[in-house]
Image (spheres, helix red, strand yellow):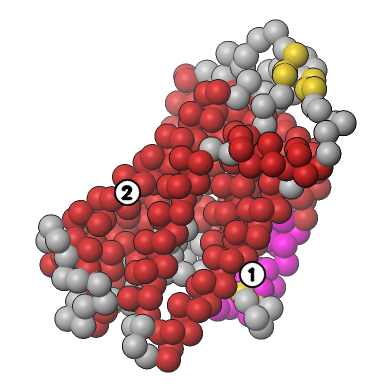
């Protein structure tokens, strides 16, 4: 878009009055969905950790501390105009790229160089890249129309591909996967042609074949083979997948009960409090609890897209679309892995799984979304993206 977007604000109003007005304008339906998801996640983290043991209570307390940090990050984002964050997004993008390069020289944790060990917490820069990437792409697209040509897609796609390549190098296939739907959703919302996006999609499929031979590690290849033929790998790579399916199937309609001592997930499922928390919820809470959780994610995404539909400022609309697709897409991928519909990727369930970087990243993204939705300024412009 080759036009200047201007806004008007009530700058004479006291800070406290503007802050109160901002709180009133927040999308409380969105925040209600977030609160219920976090509450469910905290309850089942307590169950997955074994709340009767000291290690279980320690896990729960650390999770609550991460939630508190996430809420602080959410509140901090509300204190800053998202248009200010947009102006700083290129700098933040370069800084996070630097961290993604630096983390490749750290000591591996669980076979991957994805975390900085800060002793108090492990910092995962790929998680922090998610909100920054949404901001950076929105900043680039809001002032241009070149993306309406196939050649004009090279730069915005490059903004995604560079961090994706670094994340794959760690290796972290799950986080790299979740960036793909964000790229297509933001470009589509900006007005890129469907035919051009289809061609890019075909090129991406061809690239996946090359990834198999030149990018993927042997254990990642075995994960995909185990997904295709789990019986052959049942005692190794397919163990988590099969135990997750057994746990979900044994939950039935009503579930085995919260913190059930006889739950399969409690006894046999590794990483049950992080990547496979959905299996714990489906077994102990049954189909109804798992369905409620997915419904809450759907309502959260719809609330985000409603904000995108309402907002006229172009970058705000793209931020709302990007964050909505990010949260919903990551939730679907995580649930799909637990159900055996997708290969095991090591991706957390946003707002639910245990993990400091993941929770803080999700709250930062939702803070951006709420910030966009609460901003009701007069925009002087003549046309929309399309």
Q: Report the disc number at residue 123.
A: 1
Taking the view exactly as shown, the residue that stands out farthest to the bottom is 54
Taking the view exactly as shown, the residue that stands out farthest to the top is 382
Q: Mark 2, mark 1: which one is toward the viewer?
A: 2
Which percent across, then down, holds residue 58?
A: 48, 85
N-terminal-most mark, 2 or 1: 1
Decide: is 139 above or below 104. Answer: above
Mark 2 residue crowding within 10 angstroms, few (<14) / some (14–19) / many (20+): some
At x 61%, y 17%, the residue is 385
Mark 1 residue crowding within 10 angstroms, few (<14) / some (14–19) / many (20+): some
Q: Is residue 368 magenta?
A: no
Q: Quick one: quadrant of the C terminus?
A: top right
Q: Is residue 101 magenta?
A: yes
Which percent across, then down, holds residue 19?
A: 73, 42
Q: Secondary structure at mark 2?
A: helix
**Along the line of sight, which residue is nearer the eye, 57 or 12?**
12
Specify whether residue 72 is in view.
yes
Residue 142 picture quarter: top right
Residue 106 picture quarter: bottom right
- The residues colored magenta run 96-116
Whether the residues at callouts 2 and 1 have beta carbons within 8 Å, the answer is no
**Along the line of sight, which residue is nearer the eye, 33 or 119?**
33
Residue 378 picture quarter: top right
Q: Secondary structure at mark 1?
A: strand
Q: Report the disc number at residue 294.
A: 2
- 130 relative to 235 in the view: left or right: right
């Amino acid at each position: 878009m080759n036009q200047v977007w201007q806004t008007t604000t009530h700058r004479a109003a006291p800070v406290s009055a503007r802050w109160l007005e901002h709180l009133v304008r927040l999308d409380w339906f969105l925040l209600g969905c977030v609160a219920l998801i976090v509450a469910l996640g905290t309850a089942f983290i307590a169950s997955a950790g074994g709340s009767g043991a000291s290690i279980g209570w320690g896990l729960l307390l650390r999770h609550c501390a991460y939630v508190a940090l996430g809420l602080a990050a959410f509140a901090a984002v509300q204190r800053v105009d998202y248009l200010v964050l947009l102006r700083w997004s290129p700098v933040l993008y370069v800084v996070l790229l630097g961290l993604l390069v630096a983390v490749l020289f750290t000591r591996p944790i669980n076979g991957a160089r994805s975390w900085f060990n800060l002793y108090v917490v492990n910092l995962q820069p790929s998680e922090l890249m998610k909100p920054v990437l949404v901001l950076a792409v929105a900043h680039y697209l809001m002032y241009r129309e070149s993306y309406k040509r196939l050649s004009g897609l090279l730069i915005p796609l490059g903004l995604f591909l560079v961090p994706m390549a670094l994340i794959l190098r760690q290796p972290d296939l799950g986080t790299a996967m979740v960036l793909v739907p964000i790229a297509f959703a933001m470009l589509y919302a900006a007005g890129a042609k469907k035919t051009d996006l289809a061609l890019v999609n075909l090129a991406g499929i061809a690239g996946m074949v090359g990834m198999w031979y030149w990018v993927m590690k042997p254990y990642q290849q075995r994960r995909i083979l185990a997904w295709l033929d789990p019986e052959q790998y049942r005692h190794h790579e397919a163990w988590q997948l099969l135990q997750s399916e057994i746990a979900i199937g044994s939950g039935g309609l009503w579930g085995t009960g919260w913190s059930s001592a006889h739950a399969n997930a409690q006894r046999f499922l590794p990483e049950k409090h992080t990547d496979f928390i959905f299996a714990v919820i489906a077994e102990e809470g049954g189909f109804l609890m798992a369905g409620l959780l997915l419904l809450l994610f759907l309502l959260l995404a719809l609330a985000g897209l409603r904000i995108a539909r309402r907002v006229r400022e172009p970058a705000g609309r793209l931020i709302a679309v990007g964050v909505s697709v990010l949260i919903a897409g990551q939730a679907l991928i995580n649930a799909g892995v637990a159900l055996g519909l997708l290969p095991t990727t090591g991706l957390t369930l946003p707002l639910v799984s245990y993990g400091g970087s993941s929770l803080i990243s999700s709250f930062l993204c939702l803070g951006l979304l709420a910030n966009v939705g609460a901003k009701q300024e007069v925009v002087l412009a003549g046309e929309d993206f399309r």
